[in-house]
Image (spheres, grey):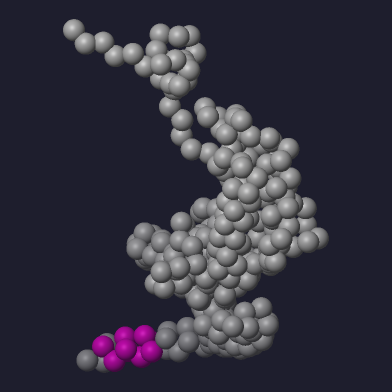
Amino acid sequence: MNEGIKNINKTLLQWKDEAINYLPKILLAIVVFLTFYFLAKFIRKFSIRFYQKLFKSKPEAVGLISSIIYFIILLMGTFLTLEVLGLESVLTKLLAGAGIVGIVAGFAFKDIASNAFAGFLLNVQRPFKIGDWVSLDETFGTILEIGMITTSVKTISGQEVFVPNQLIYNNTFTNYSTFGKRRVIFKSGVSYGDDLDLVRRASLEEVDKIEAVLKNEVIDFYFTEIASSTYNFEVRFWIKFNYQKDYLNAMNEIIMRIKKRFEQEDISLAYAVTTLDFGVKGGVNIFDKPIVTRTE
């Protein structure tokens, strides 16, 4: 009985000595953790103020980024606190467990993370803004919202399409509103018998009459090809661009003006021509010789 009491007293004395020796480490660990805790809070407040200026229209992005920074600093403080306490084995197990969880989470949230990072880049780089006319992943329309995961586009047909942000950065995309102007390229062709100088002059004159044409930009005209039955050409000119209807109205007007002017100038717009070979090299016009039919 007395021996058992002696053993208990001995154990308690050992615990007391160890606690006294361990007390400085505990106090230092508390100081380290509290330091990192208040540092994390301070940096989170600072990051919120900083990113609010960077992402004025994206409060959710500001909250997400500041929370991530806060969590990382707090995690660093926790690991260092365990080191101070001499709990390296616990830290090793935590890191191993975090590694396994990280691998599993990496596979599970790979696409979400990619889209979120692409959304972060979109908000930093700002290649387009709300209301811009864009073509994203073969989707054409105006930007409705630039989210952290997806970007929504209102199409010509009035539908809202959500484009994953990583697809935007993995492919080329076009912003038609960047310069506030857009080039209209009209393509057509005329017959072999037409006066090409007249075709060029008439086309340029009609383009110059379009009210939407930017007069300070050059109007280009080029014959581009001698096709099977036509001389093909292009007329290129710039218009002020705010909406898709600006482009469509300009294209509609140039088509109507070119047709009307060509009719006045007796210029023939292109159409497919088929040549019939009646045994004559190069073919022969059907009206050059009388058609003879034979009956048995």
Q: How many marks?
A: 0
Q: As drawn, is 215 to the left or to the right of 169? A: right
Q: Which picture quadrant has residue 6? A: bottom left
Q: Look at the image and tell me whether residue 196 can be seen.
A: yes
Over which residues does the magenta segment extend?
4-12
Q: Which residue is drawn at 40% across and 8% down?
A: 279
Q: Where does residue 188 sit, x and y in percent of width and height? A: 57, 43
Q: Residue at x 41, y 20 (%)?
A: 276
Quadrant of the snapshot with the C terminus: top left
Q: Nearer the viewer, residue 178 or 29?
A: 178
Q: Which of 293 and 283 is in front in this view?
A: 293
Vertical side of 81 occupied by 2: above or below:
below
- The N terminus lies in which quarter of the figure? bottom left
**Residue sitting nearer the eye, 73 or 176:** 176
Magenta-drawn stretch, dominant element (helix, strand or loop): helix
Q: Decide if residue 26 is on the left or right side of residue 6.
A: right
Camera sees residue 99: no
Q: In this view, does 209 lie to the left or right of 268?
A: right
| Residue lying furthest left | 296
Residue in the image at 46% along x and 72% along y: 154
**Residue 251 in magenta stretch:** no
Q: Position of residue 32 (x, y in %)?
A: 59, 83
Horizontal and vertical percent for residue 284? 47, 16
Image coords of residue 144 (percent x, y): 50, 76
Residue situated in front as seen by the camera: 224 or 5: 224
- Residue farthest along the right direction in this orientation: 216
**Residue 10 inside the magenta-drawn segment:** yes
